[in-house]
Amino acid sequence: MQDIEKRIAQLKEEKNAVILAHYYQTGDIIDIADMVGDSYGLSRKAKETDADMIVFCGVKFMAESAKILSPEKKVLLPVPDAGCPLADMVTSSDIERLRREYPGSAVVCYVNSTAEVKAESDICVTSANAVDVVKSLKEERVVFVPDQNLGHYVAEKVPEKEIIPFSGYCIVHHQVSVDDVKKVLDAAPDALLLVHPECTPDVVNKADFVGSTAQIIRHVQQSNHKKFIIGTEMGILHVLKKKNPDKEFYLLTPKLYCTNMKKTKRLDVLHALQYGSMKLRSRKKSWNVRKKA
Ligand code: 13P
Ligand code: SF4
């Protein structure tokens, strides 16, 4: 075992900590995690443990969600500026405005949102349960924040309700085009196309299966098919290949790379465990600034 990995294991034991990694993290982080999963699934699993500390290798809204579910645990985000641009696209003042514009509507927020927006919304959903939750609401009109594409997907699946999608989008999934789909299908015509609902409706309409990260993984495992085109962030390929060595995977496009999800390094996890969520890179920066002055 490398020194850093050994030290992480020791500190984890000392602090009674659990390391969570979202599927989009690098293989390096996934391989040292105690639990790997989708954003909400990880928070739920962590709540059930008797750990005192959660180190969440993901982005800020995920660590916030873990804290909401486990207020008694210390939750650390190893890289504090690992954010989700989609989550930051809607604010609580947008919610106030939408409530004024659409009185009597339910305000539904996707889990990819800030804690503040969650607090202002009526209900919070994941990409896996959004359709069922919206169907179950008594309101006929639903304001859906922040992701327009997931909002459109829900609207398509729940035609009996009026869905008003907010204008936010995931800067990673939203850039996938129909042309990208065409190119990859030309290269692998017999592969199944699986995409995340954060992709645009044009792309979603071409897919054989639409689902959250956990649902995509489950679908691959349950399918007899051998070839799959993956239309979500490329980090998921590490887990897919590990779990299905007999199957072949094609990434829909190399554009499916989330820089925020790739910020966390093993050294950041070590520092989070040792000192709190401060990371080495920011410590270095402030030291340099002091030296200059
Ligand atoms: P999941 O909830 O499907 O894991 O997705 C999280 C995410 O950030 C999608 O871009
Ligand atoms: Fe946010 Fe998109 Fe990155 Fe997911 S892939 S964390 S939605 S920016």
Image (cartoon, grey):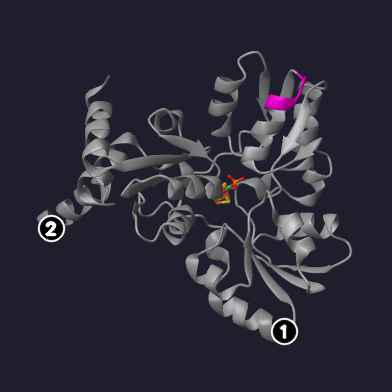
Q: Is residue 82 above or below residue 24?
A: below
Q: Residue 79: x, y in percent?
A: 35, 49
Between 217 and 137, the one lying in front of the other is 137
Q: Residue 137's quadrant in the figure?
A: bottom right
Residue 252 seen by the camera: no
Q: Is residue 80 above or below residue 109?
A: above
Q: Residue 37: x, y in percent?
A: 53, 39
Between 276 and 262, the one lying in front of the other is 276
| Magenta stretch in the rendered image | 221-225
- Is residue 207 rendered to the left or right of residue 53? right
What is the chief secondary structure element of the magenta stretch?
A: loop
Residue type (three-letter) at the residue carrying disc 1: Glu
Report the residue at 78% width, 45% height from top: 204
Q: Secondary structure at mark 1?
A: helix
Considering every residue shown, the one lying at the far right of the view is 160
Q: Residue 242: x, y in percent?
A: 55, 21
Q: Residue 154: x, y in percent?
A: 78, 57
Report the residue marked by disc 2.
Answer: 290
Report the residue at 72% width, 39% height from top: 195
Report the residue at 82% width, 73% height from top: 140
- Is residue 236 rendered to the left or right of residue 66? right
Report the residue marked by disc 1.
Answer: 101
Residue type (three-letter) at the residue carrying disc 2: Arg
Mark 1 burial class by Cα count in 10 Å: few <14, some 14-19, many 20+: few
Residue 5 seen by the camera: yes
Earlier along the polypeptide chain: callout 2 or callout 1?
A: 1
Distance between the alpha carbons at the discs numbered 2 and 1: 49 Å
